[in-house]
Amino acid sequence: MKKVRLCLQDILNERHLTQKELCQATGIYPATLNKMCRNEGTSINKEHLAKVAQSLKIDDISELIRLE
């Protein structure tokens, strides 16, 4: 079965950004963002995705989420 994968840590690495910087920009708790970066959990908060996408100037959600 395929799995949904967030590519958040890859994007942060490519852009030379830290999780702390993204936390400050989005207001998302560090523990929550860390779980997103490590692809932990079984659900994705749409509000958090929107904040991350807006902060990173991502227009196409497929840049952030992959089905593998």
Image (cartoon, helix red, strand yellow):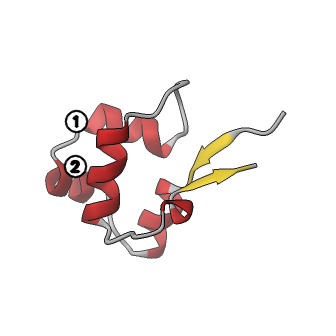
- How many numbered marks appear? 2
Q: How far is disc 2 from disc 1 in space, using C-alphas?
A: 6 Å
Disc 2 crowd rating (10 Å Cα; few below 14, some 14-19, many 20+) is: some
Query: What residue did someone put label 1 on?
Result: 29
Give the mark nearest the N terminus, 2 or 1. 2
Disc 1 crowd rating (10 Å Cα; few below 14, some 14-19, many 20+) is: few
Residue 40: percent from left, percent from top:
53, 30
Residue 45: percent from left, percent from top:
38, 34
Kindly identify the residue that appears in the image at 26 percent across and 52 percent down. Answer: 51
- Give above or below for 63 relative to 39: below
Tell me, yes or no, whether the two marked residues, 2 and 1, touch with CB atoms within 8 Å: yes
Kindly identify the residue that appears in the image at 35 percent across and 60 percent down. Answer: 53
Helix, strand or loop under label 2: helix
Residue nearer the viewer, 37 or 47: 47
- 20 vs 35, left or right, is left
Q: Give the amino acid type for the residue marked by disc 1 in the picture.
A: Tyr
The image quarter containing residue 33 is top left
Residue nearer the viewer, 9 or 2: 2
Q: Single out the residue that lies furthest toward the top.
A: 42
Kindly identify the residue that appears in the image at 25 percent across and 63 percent down. Answer: 55
Helix, strand or loop under label 1: loop
The image quarter containing residue 16 is bottom left
Q: Single out the residue that lies furthest toward the bottom.
A: 15
Please tell me the numbered disc located at residue 52.
Answer: none
- 18 vs 12, left or right, is left
- Give above or below for 44 relative to 58: above
- 34 vs 4, left or right, is left
Q: Single out the residue that lies furthest toward the right.
A: 1
Q: Give the amino acid type for the residue marked by disc 2 in the picture.
A: Cys
Please tell me the numbered disc located at residue 23.
Answer: 2
Residue nearer the viewer, 15 or 45: 45
